[in-house]
Image (cartoon, rainbow, N blue to C red):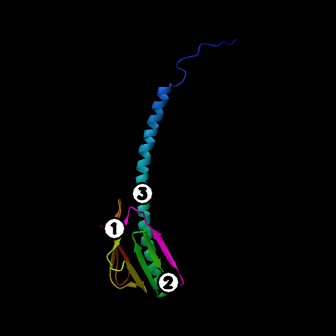
């Protein structure tokens, strides 16, 4: 026959032990969450820089192939780069993170790519918390040169 014994006082975790385990786990999650947020911000900045470079290369190739002009405009207040392909092709807008500042050394804050060429060399200064770059649009053949600041 089976008998019921006295309940044991050590059969389960106490409330204090459970709270201590939860406190340690929440601390680890908090530390992991802040470091992953920095990683995501850095990845977002690198992806935005890559999108800008790719969009410029595509605009350059389009201008050269179609013997037309493409206008690149930077608006740092709205954090956008706009590429205007003309009235028939429309435009492309690239957003970049709020933590990044883009400056251009051109007085009109725009670059005109005409038949694959630009009239004068232009530098775009990318300043963010993780990346600092100078993107130079070279004059006669319109290619990019990306160098750290």
Q: Position of residue 3 (x, y in %)?
A: 66, 12
Residue 72 sits in quarter: bottom left
C-alpha separation, residue under disc 1 versus residue under disc 3: 17 Å
Residue 55 sits in quarter: bottom left
Q: Element type at marker 2? A: loop
Q: Position of residue 85 (x, y in %)?
A: 49, 81
What's the magenta region?
A: 86-101
Q: Element type at marker 1? A: strand
Quarter of the picture holding the C terminus: bottom left
First-in-chain label (1 vs 3): 3
First-in-chain label (2 vs 1): 2
**Which numbered circle lies on residue 133?**
1
Q: Residue at x 34, y 71 (%)?
A: 103
Q: Residue at x 49, y 86 (%)?
A: 66
Instruction: Classify residue 7 as left or right of residue 112.
Output: right
First-in-chain label (3 vs 2): 3
Q: Position of residue 29 (x, y in %)?
A: 45, 42
What residue sits right under mark 2 in the picture? 86
C-alpha separation, residue under disc 2 versus residue under disc 1: 29 Å
**Which secondary structure is most common in the magenta stretch?**
loop
């Amino acid at each position: 026959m089976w008998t019921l014994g006295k309940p044991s006082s050590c059969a389960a975790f106490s409330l204090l032990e459970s709270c201590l385990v939860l406190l340690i786990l929440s601390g680890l999650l908090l530390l992991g969450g802040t470091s992953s947020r920095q990683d995501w911000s850095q990845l977002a900045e690198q992806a935005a820089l890559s999108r800008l470079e790719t969009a410029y290369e595509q605009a350059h190739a389009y201008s050269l192939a179609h013997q037309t002009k493409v206008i690149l405009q930077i608006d740092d207040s709205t954090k956008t780069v706009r590429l205007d392909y003309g009235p028939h092709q429309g435009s492309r807008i690239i957003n970049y993170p709020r933590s990044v500042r883009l400056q251009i050394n051109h007085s009109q804050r725009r670059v005109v790519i005409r038949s694959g060429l630009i009239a004068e060399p232009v530098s775009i200064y990318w300043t963010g918390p993780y990346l600092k770059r100078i993107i130079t649009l070279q004059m006669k053949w319109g290619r990019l040169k990306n160098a750290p600041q």
